[in-house]
Image (spheres, helix red, strand yellow):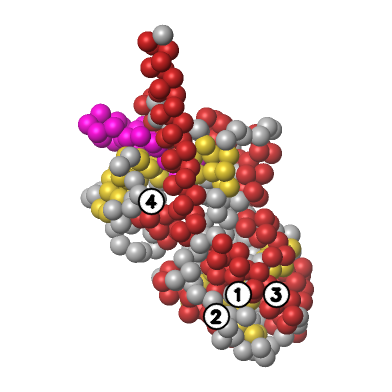
Amino acid sequence: MTRVAMFMHGGLAPELSREDVPAIAALVSRLAGLFEVTVYTLKRPDGDCEPFSCGNAGVRVVRSGEDDHIVKTAPRLLHAFWYDHRRKPFGLVHGFWALPGGLTAVLAGRTARIPSIVTMLGGEAACFPEIGYGNMRKTGPRAATLWTCRHADTLTALTCYQLDHLQRFSGRKFRRTRVIPFGADDSLFPYSDRRPESPPYRLLHIGHLNRVKDQATLLRAFQNIARRVDCRLTIIGQDTMNGSLQRLAGELGISPQVTFEGFVPHEDLHRHLACAHLLLHSSLYEGEGVVFAEAASSGLPICGTHVGLLADLGDALGATVEPGDPDALAEAAIGLLSDGTRINKLREQGRNWALEHTAEWTTARFAELYRSLLRARQGMGTQEREWATA
């Protein structure tokens, strides 16, 4: 069984927790059933550095320094990789996020002469200096990100939206790219038709409370909606803004109609998706927005900003507006809620897309990519041996 090394700076935890990224954990676990996977991930100095497992994958935790810049952590990951590679060689390396995981994968692949894959997951192609978000906002991370993406044997993006944004900063197209979104686990997010057709309408938002998700625009849009439609809003996500959004809801006079649920375990989200009428989303940027795939699997239409998977699929999943416009978001939401025929069509289209792009489908696409790179490497090795004996 081929050995695969994966590099990341988070996303996995010994037990399901707020630190765990379910889509990443599920992909790693499934791929570890097909390949011999070792994951190298970073922890801050005060974190637990004991190794653990993710399915059949072994996870090695590499301690990073308190003040380490994200690019400077690559040598720590690379050192751990070489310690294991000398004892039992890897056949392929895969980095998650361009920095430092992707950068480490490219360096490991070039020095060990094995194929490298880099998967963009977050803000690699984003530039929002006003909120301190995105690799493209500063010269150093931008240069390191673009170098990493250009030198990977294959670069994968979650959406065309994400890849297009990166190519604009690069000024040229990248070679050997693939778009592979994270599909939803349909056993966790089954289709639901239990939603009542009449008000009060249940609107749902899922995402960490932060400035990139722009829940201030969400609340202002809901204020507009609530003036005209009998509705309630449930917001699910860990609060990283110290209660400022709860205070804003009070200032807008909508606190009685808004429930902040806080963190909800991934396996419990289906209960909220199953009874909601509309997913309301306000992000300034998304690489994909895995919640869009989960909502589609559940039969929940989406009204959100033109980012990530919504930008790729548009009218197939819901209604989209430009980021930062609460009035446009409100109008689009009211338009959907008042159009039962369109709502039913969106439920059907979303469910059909989700059934074709499940979590198993995502795993199969990466497994195919691994095998194609390994076959190409074996072919090159055969050619080199033939030339050496010619």
Q: Residues within 10 Å of mark 2 (few under 14, many from 20)?
A: some
Place residue 256 in its image quadrant.
bottom right
Q: Of the numbered discs in the image, which one, if any, rests on residue 192?
A: 2
Q: Looking at the image, do the residues carrying marks 2 and 3 touch, with CB atoms under 8 Å apart?
A: no
Residue with the mark numbered 1: 300
Question: Which residue occupies 49% across, 57% down?
Answer: 361
Read off the magenta span.
72-98
Give the CA separation, mark 2 to mark 3: 14 Å
Question: Which residue occupies 54% across, 35% down?
Answer: 149
Q: Amino acid at mark 4?
A: Leu
Residue with the mark numbered 3: 345
Kindly state the secondary structure of the residue where label 4 is placed. Answer: helix
Kindly report which numbered mark, 1 or 2, lies closer to the viewer in this rendering: 2
Mark with earlier residue (4, 3): 4
Kindly state the secondary structure of the residue where label 1 is placed. Answer: loop
Give the CA separation, mark 4 to mark 1: 29 Å
Mark with earlier residue (2, 3): 2
Give the CA separation, mark 4 to mark 3: 34 Å
Q: Amino acid at mark 1?
A: Leu
Q: What is the x, y in percent for residue 259?
A: 54, 80
Q: Residues within 10 Å of mark 4 (few under 14, many from 20)?
A: many
Mark with earlier residue (1, 2): 2
Residue with the mark numbered 4: 31
Q: Looking at the image, do the residues carrying marks 2 and 4 touch, with CB atoms under 8 Å apart?
A: no
Q: Residues within 10 Å of mark 1 (few under 14, many from 20)?
A: many
Give the CA separation, mark 1 to mark 2: 8 Å
Q: What is the x, y in percent for residue 257?
A: 60, 84
